[in-house]
Image (tube, rainbow, N blue to C red):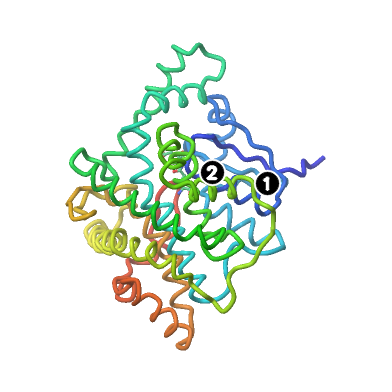
Amino acid sequence: MQNESYKLYGADISYFTGKVRAYLRWKNIPFEEIASDAGVYKEIILPRVGFPVIPVVIAPDGRCLQDSTEIIDTLESCHTGPSVYPDTPRQRLASLLLETYGDEWLVIPAMHYRWHYNRDWAIQAFGALNAPDASAEQQREIGARRAGPFANAAVLLGAEPHMHSAIEASYECLLADLSRHFACHPFLFGDRPSIADFGLIGPLYAHQYRDPKSGDHMRKTAPLVAQWVERMQNPIPLSGAFLPNDEIPQTLLPVLRRMFIEQLPVLADSARHVRQWIMEHPDEALPRVIGKHAFMLEGREGQRIIRPYSLWMLQRARDYYRSLDSENKAETDAMLRTVGGEVFLGFEDPPRLARAGLSVKVAQ
Ligand SMILES: N[C@@H](CCC(=O)N[C@@H](CS)C(=O)NCC(=O)O)C(=O)O
């Protein structure tokens, strides 16, 4: 007999599990969440996915879905009811861009605050997830081993010591901008959460709300953002509408502007590196990381790894933009220009990319 409920293999401490969980709740899709301890990785995730990752969703028909974006897109295509994708051009493009911002850029403050302010707590939590029945001491040992790559990732993604103050300044401004927005609107585009809200909830739930020191800081300095996190956790399923007339709220413009200032130049330079890498390695698969490049944040220069996967996320927004007719393009262009979106307008795309495991490959 078929089990009617989806299974979400994830964790409370996981960025992308928070994104998928919030989506499943809003979409009113019945699911059971299973904490991914060592046994789950060994018996479910590795045999079905081939590499260790969460979240993973197993559908009632046995289909295995991995990658939060593909999970949401697959479920959107087979569950009727209101969509998390606005269907008007400016809102749709802005929501795809902000999903990329949440998924691929806000990972910098998320990892920085977790590993530089909540480290001991996070190590214990990694251990407790992996070996729920072990002693606290064993959990700390296991946690320290399991958390190693994630803790290193904070620095690789750009959180070197001399960048900490810039990361914090940028995050504080984002919280202030979002606070002004949530004083006027319950979600980013009105009364209904969009794919952009689900993108932002990744970093802003597990790391910035739930990690103890980060959560205290958010509740104290940005209570309206904390309340949005709570709305995203306990939504009224399938409720609400996006703003009429394809309106982009004025209060969302600073958030888009921040994305264009901080992330777009990095994506443009990543595209340049990917094109170059493919030219120099014509017969090789793109690795998950292709070296490092410089980036700027709040006037400071740092170094970070170049991840081709981020360009696959941007490609979704680029595809949508290219699909627009000239009238709609003119409308979106005007919106983009008011928030410094020139880099997006003149973006030089890499070759077409397809997802491949935790990275991407050149599409055939
Ligand atoms: N882009 C993927 C990434 C999934 C992901 O990075 N998951 C983290 C935990 S939140 C993980 O398991 N990472 C393993 C790794 O990076 O090797 C998604 O949207 O689901």
Callout 2 amino acid: Gly
Position of 133 with respect to 321 (left or right) is right
The N terminus, quarter of image: top right
Front-lying residue, 188 or 50: 188
Label 2 with label 1: CB-CB less than 8 Å: no
Residue at image position (49%, 65%) is 95
Q: Position of residue 20 (x, y in %)?
A: 57, 47
Measured along the vertical axis of the image, is residue 294 above or below residue 316? above
Front-lying residue, 110 or 355: 110
Front-lying residue, 59 or 361: 59
Measured along the vertical axis of the image, is residue 210 above or below residue 293? above
Q: Position of residue 358 (x, y in %)?
A: 43, 46
Q: Position of residue 105 (x, y in %)?
A: 36, 52
Callout 1 amino acid: Ala
Q: Secondary structure at mark 1?
A: loop
Quarter of the rendered image showing ligand 1: top left
Residue at image position (50%, 57%) is 182
Mark sitting earlier along the chain (2/1): 2
Q: Secondary structure at mark 2?
A: helix
Q: Position of residue 184 (x, y in %)?
A: 52, 62
Q: Residue furthest right?
A: 1
Distance between the Cα atoms at labels 2 and 1?
18 Å
Disc 2 designates what residue? 18
The C terminus, quarter of image: bottom left
Give the label, 2 or 1, closer to the camera: 2
Q: Residue furthest bottom?
A: 327
> Mark 1: few, some, or many residues within 10 Å (few <14, many ≥20)?
some
Disc 1 designates what residue? 59
